[in-house]
Image (cartoon, rainbow, N blue to C red):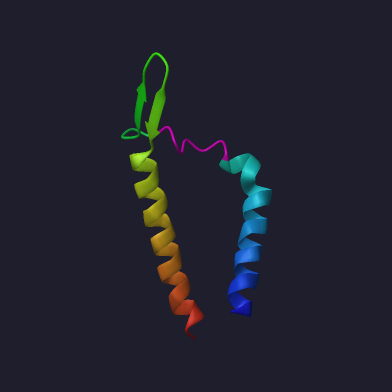
Amino acid sequence: MQKLLIILGLALLLLGFAWPWLKELPLGRLPGDIAIEGKHFRIYFPLTTMLLVSLVLSLLLSALSGWWRR
């Protein structure tokens, strides 16, 4: 449990340092993201972004799980 918390803390720290560059990525504005705007409301459903982030996280966690078990 200690290793997991340390790794998550370091990952959040790296994410915080990389945020100025990460916010420039087109995530949230990809083709397939659904945006509906009316006169008094806005609905946004980032379908493609969610699928892409899920795929990347699944691959990353899958690779880390093999390393973690050693």
Examine the structure image and report whether residue 37 is included in the region drawn in magenta. Answer: no
Q: Residue furthest left?
A: 32
Q: Residue furthest front?
A: 40
Magenta stretch: helix, strand or loop mostly:
loop
The residue stretch that appears in magenta: 23-29
Compared with 39, 18 (above or below) is: below
Quadrant housing the N terminus: bottom right
Residue 42 on image: x %, y %: 41, 24
Residue 63 on image: x %, y %: 43, 70
Q: Residue at x 62, y 71 (%)?
A: 5
Compared with 47, 1 (above or below) is: below
Q: Residue at x 63, y 58 (%)?
A: 12
Compared with 45, 63 (above or below) is: below
Residue 19 on image: x %, y %: 63, 44
- Left/right of residue 50 with respect to residue 15 in the rendered view: left
- Total count of labels: 0
